[in-house]
Image (cartoon, rainbow, N blue to C red):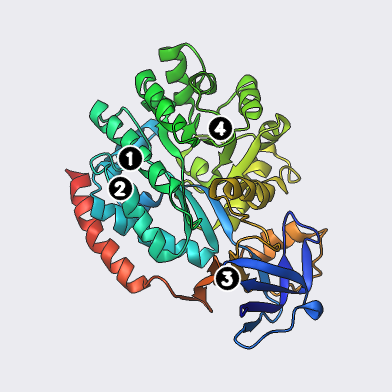
Amino acid sequence: MSGLLISNATVLRPGSEPAVIAPGAVRVEGEEIVWVGPAGEAPTPVPGDDVIDAKGRVCMPGLINAHHHLYSTFACGLAAPASRNFQEVLKNLWWRLDSALTLEDVHASALPPLARCIMAGTTTIIDHHASPFAVRGSLPMIADAVRTSGLRAALCYEVSDRDGPEIAAAGINENVAWAERCRHDKDGRFAALFGLHAAFTVGNETLTRAVNAARDFGVGFHIHVAEDRSDQDHSRENYGTRVVNRLADAGVLGPGTIAAHCVHVGPHERRLLAETGTLVVHNPSSNMNNGVGAADLKALLEAGIKLGLGTDGMRADMLAEANYAMVLQHHQAGDPSAAFGEPLDALLKTNATFASKLFNRRLGVIEPGAAADLILVDHRPFTPLDDTNLYGHLYFGVAPARVTDTMVAGRWLMRKGRLLTLDMDEITNLAREQSRGVWRRFMD
């Protein structure tokens, strides 16, 4: 069977042994990796094979973003009122923006960040969507953009009571329809979670309805948790308990659920998150941007929590986000040794494990039988690189370098820096035209 052989590469395999093979080679057939090892031991190419000489560049697994907001695209350059706290950020920017989106806007706004994901080597996205006046059909609109791009995506609609019961019901129905579609999807490109915005915008009746609906499909939830202190204040004032306790009592937590942020959780809440196997996703650049504080990664991990990494819609570059996480922990702790490896563990190990279960594919690894989601990065190690200093090279060598090639399921989405599935001029022109209407409605 003809396939693809990447040879003479610096193969990085976080989470596998050996973690570094240099010079290494990877063979792909169809949608899977079938062999990985030293370049000198690579299978002999057969007629029809595509043979790529990586010339020492890094070959590594495609990256996974565990919390994204594709719809945030049209916020770029938008003149929103100044905000003094997180609640004002939501009211002055995000809730006005998502309320201005039409279905056509949802599709157009998804395309530029998908292109940026390809260019940054992010091959799998777990997205959290909102468009309260264009709910029905919004997830298929995003899926159409994702399918064109060639990436993988887990989608959900963030249910909220902030726009009234009819829109909350529509959000539940959109999650149900998407989960039903994914139940029959066999190609491993799409997956479903059940979206909730946050505890402070979802009342008990809606929460119960959502939990019952999700249970019928066996899917987990995707929800913002204690991103700001105001979430905890609201929960105590209105429900007499803390956010995580309320979500646990409602049946939201579990090994298939993402609790994004968890900046302001206490010791008992951390124990609940750990005991239920809930994935906590850290989003450091967003937290800094919104001035909500910094999650205590040491306390989360010491509690036994599964810790992942996302960008909250801020960017597509996951290695840059890991770098933000590292320096933020150094700053918060006043200790340059704090949380050096933990952000990359979250990205390269925990994200990969969670996504593999979600998509029913082995993702985020370079091993025989794993999905052929690979990237080539223009980092030719200029200092010694082995299993003992891999993370140092990832932070300070690979992260600043350019991703040149991106593959998903054995298909090139970008080759030698050129996008193959998306036309950047076309999608940016479309987004620019659509954004004009969104901005007019935003200002009304």
Q: Which is nearer the N-term, disc 3 or disc 2?
A: 3
| Residue that carries the numbered disc 3 in the rendered image | 30
Q: Position of residue 54 (x, y in %)?
A: 67, 79
Q: Residue at x 47, y 11 (%)?
A: 240
Which residue type carries mark 1? Glu
Tag in front: 4 or 1: 1
Residue projecting furthest to the top: 240
Viewer-closest of 46 and 346: 46
**Residue 347 percent location from the top left of the image:** 63, 50
* Mark 4 or mark 2, whichever is nearer to me: 2
Estimate how packed mark 3 is, as few (under 14), some (14 to 19) or many (20 or more) residues with alpha carbons within 10 Å.
Answer: some
Depth check, mark 2 against mark 1: the one in front is 1
Specify the quadrant of the image occupied by residue 43. Answer: bottom right
From the viewer's perspective, tell me whether residue 265 is left or right of residue 100. right
* Relative vertical location of residue 41 with respect to residue 231 in this rendering, above or below: below
Question: What's the residue type where badge 2 is placed?
Answer: Ser
Question: The C terminus lies in which quarter of the figure?
Answer: top left
Q: Report the front residue among 429 and 221.
A: 221
Q: Earlier in the sequence, mark 1 or mark 3?
A: 3
Labels 2 and 1 touching (C-beta < 8 A): yes
The Cα atoms of the two marked residues, 3 and 2, are separated by: 31 Å
Q: Assign a secondary structure to mark 1.
A: helix
Q: Secondary structure at mark 4?
A: loop
Residue on which the image places disc 4: 263
**Residue indicated by mark 2:** 138
Q: Amino acid at mark 4?
A: Val
